[in-house]
Image: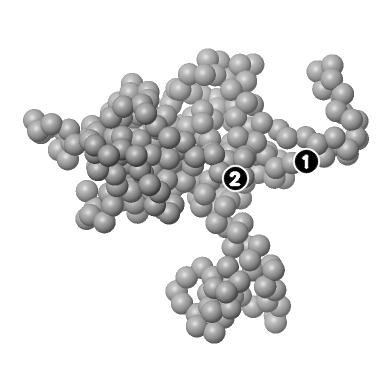
Amino acid sequence: MRRLAAKRSHDPQNDLMSALVQVDEEGDRFTEDELVAMVFLLAVAGHETTVGLISNGVFALLTHSQQWQRLLEDNSLIDSAVEELLRFDGPLSTTELAFARTDIEMRGETIPQGAIVLPAILSANRDEEIFPDADKLDITRDPNQHLAFGHGIHYCLGAPLARLEAAVTIQALLHRFPTLRLGWLRTKWIIPAATFRIGSHRCPSAFKRNRRSREPSVTMCVDWTVGHASRACDHTDIPCVPVRFTLGSVTLGSRDPL
């Protein structure tokens, strides 16, 4: 990252790193450490989490075919569907570590001053006292006061963009592959080194290019990690291709948009 920053400072390109290197506020510029920290923040908080939202969300819809079909038939449900996917299996399982500043009494238990606190977002989003039938995926759920983006002063600044990206991507997927389904449920999952994050890896998926076609469905192993480095695939009996999403289109591998 530091080598790239140094290179872009001398040879700027039309990319994010070049833009950050050239930021100048009345002579005040990012230090090298500030620049690297900002890029990592944007890569993890601004990209990786949305990757997890999209991959987990698509997998949830494909394993709940009635919800997939309902969204396919009524596109106006996309906003509430995104909210439910954030709640049901969002990209963050916990927050970052926090420390109790004072003794805290909560439901008959005491969290002592200085103790480590690690709130579990996914657990809170399945709280039966807040969400009736919390383990059920319901894209029409209302109200849906989930904590996928945090709360209060730490609420995610990128929430509107993440919602937009997920909505556009899922709508494009529904439009391009209305007959998409899982080939089978032998699916791998990624648990990154940063244990508070989770995302889907690869799963065999079947689809038809034309939903009215009588030709058999095409089954292939689809890499839903959306931009991660390629990984070895153990599905030797079917082709394995990565998914690439752009606004308004979905591309499999290096093929033209489908």
Q: Is 170 or 226 nearer to us in this picture? A: 226
Q: Residue at x 54, y 19 (%)?
A: 134
- Viewer-nearest residue: 189 or 37: 189
- The amino acid sitting under disc 1 is Ala
Amino acid marked by disc 2 = Ala
Q: Give the side of residue 252 with respect to residue 91, left or right.
A: left
Q: Secondary structure at mark 2?
A: loop
Tell me residue 21's x, y (percent): 59, 75
| Residue ID for mark 1 | 98
The numbered disc on residue 46 is none
User: Which image quarter: residue 216?
Assistant: top left
Which residue appears at 63% of the width and 62% of the height?
38
Which of marks 2 and 1 precedes in the sequence? 1
Task: Tell me if residue 244 comes above or below residue 184 in the rendering.
Answer: below
Which x, y percent locates residue 13? 46, 77
Q: Is residue 124 something one can see in this rendering?
A: yes
Q: Is residue 142 above or below residue 233?
A: above
Helix, strand, or loop for circle 1?
strand
Residue under numbered circle 2:
193
Say if residue 173 shows up in the picture: no
> Which residue is at 82% across, 39% downward?
99
Whole-angstrom CA distance, mark 1 to mark 2, is: 19 Å
Q: Residues within 10 Å of mark 2 (few under 14, many from 20)?
A: few
Q: Nearer the viewer, mark 1 or mark 2?
A: 2
